Amino acid sequence: MVVLGRLFRGARISVGCSYARPCLKSSCYSTDGDGSLVRVFDRNLKKRQRDRAAWLMREKDQLVDTVVENVLDRLEDCKRSFHTALCLGGSLGAVRRLLRGRGSIEKLIMMDMSSDMVRKLKDSEKDLPCDNLETSYVVGDEEFLPVKENSVDLIISCLGLHWTNDLPGAMIQCRLALKPDGLFLAAILGGETLKELRIACTIAQMEREGGVSPRLSPLAQVRDAGNLLTRAGFSLPGVDVDEFTVRYESALELIEHLRMMGETNALLQRNKTLKKETAIATAAVYDSMFATEDGTVPATFQVIYMTGWKEHPSQQKSKRRGSATVSFQDIQKHFGSDGQP
C-alpha cells in the first residue's frame, strides 16, 4: 500500500456524495444473454464531465502521475520498440508528459471523447520539451474505436476504460486495432476504490432519507481482469494491482479532487438531486469514522493493471494438455520433501 501526500489543500468546497463507485456485478461490463448491450453509464454525461475536468485539473496530480509511471514502466520491460502508439482517454496529459522516450515511440495518437480535453492537450504541447515525437489528436469514443485494424503497435489506456458500458467489447476493439505482436497496456480503478466514501454515503442516506438511492457505479474486481483479457482474445495476459491511500483535509476536498479527475458519477439511473443535509451528513460520518490523528481523512484508490499481447507466431505458447513427459510425483521423489536431491 502506498500513502500519498495531501492533495489540493486550498480546494473549494462542493457538495455531493454521489461520486463513490463500489463494485457491482462484473456483468455490468458486458452484454447480457441475448447479446444486447447492458447500458450502465451515461456517456454523454461523462463527456461533459471530461469537458469540465479539462479546465479544472491541475498540471500535475500526484496520484495520476504515480499510476501513469507504473503503466509506462512496463514499456521498459519490453525489448522491442513500438513505432505507432494510441493513447486512449483518461490521463492523456500525464502520459504525454511522462513518456520520456519509453517504448521508442515515433508516432503518438492521443484520443479522448472530450473535445475540450483534446483542445487543452494540443495547447499544452508547446510547453513540452522537444522530443521529435509526432503527435496527433483525435476526438473519439472508446466504445466505438475510430481506428483501422492492424494499424498500431501499442495501445495505452490509463484510468479511462472503467467508464465504458461494454468493457470486453472495448478491449476486443483494441486488440483488433493492434498489429500482430502489438501490446495493450491499461489501468482501471478496482472495486475497493473509495470504499470509505461508499460507507459514509450509505450511512448518511439511510439516516437522512431512509434508504439508499442509486448513486454508485460498478467497478471490476481483480479476479475479473484476467477473464476480461482472455475474453478479449489477448495472449500472454498479465494482471497486477496497486492500492493507494490519499489523505485529504476533508471529504469535501476528496469530492473536488474527483471532479478534477473527471471521475464523478455517470450512472444512467442516478438520482440527479442530492439534499444538502445528506451531503453534510456524509462529510460528518466520513470524518467521524475515518479521520486520522492529524485530522486528515484517507481515501483508497485500487488500481488494476492489465497487460496483453495480440497473438503472433513468435510468442510463447502453452503445451497441449496431457503432453507432459514427467509427473510432479516423480519430481517430488527425486528431490524429496525438503527440496534437496
Image (cartoon, grey):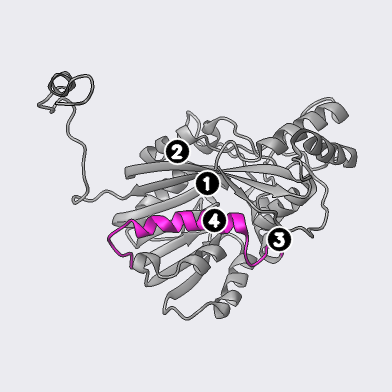
The residue stretch that appears in magenta: 56-83
Image disc number at residue 225: 2
| Amino acid type of the residue that numbered disc 2 sits on in the rendered structure | Ala
Badge 4: how crowded within 10 Å, few (<14), some, or many (20+)? some
Mark 2 to mark 1: distance in Å?
10 Å
Please report contact status of discs 2 and 1: CB closer than 8 Å, yes or no. Answer: yes
Per the image, label 2 sits on a secondary structure element best described as helix
Spatial CA distance of label 4 from label 2 is: 21 Å
Q: Position of residue 241 (x, y in %)?
A: 48, 42
Task: Quote the CA–CA distance across marks 3 and 2.
Answer: 29 Å
Crowd tier of the residue under label 2, counting other residues whose Cα lies within 10 Å: few below 14, some 14–19, many 20 or above:
many
| Image quarter in which the C terminus is found | top left
Check the image and name the residue furthest to the left. Answer: 325
Q: Answer with mark 4 or mark 3, whichever residue precedes in sequence.
A: 3
Q: Nearer the viewer, residue 310 or 256?
A: 256
The residue singled out by tag 3 in the image is: 52
- Badge 1 is on which residue? 188
Quadrant in which the N terminus appears: top right
Q: Which quarter of the figure has residue 54?
A: bottom right
| First along the sequence among labels 4 and 2 | 4
The residue wearing badge 4 is: 66
Determine contact: label 4, label 3, CB under 8 Å: no
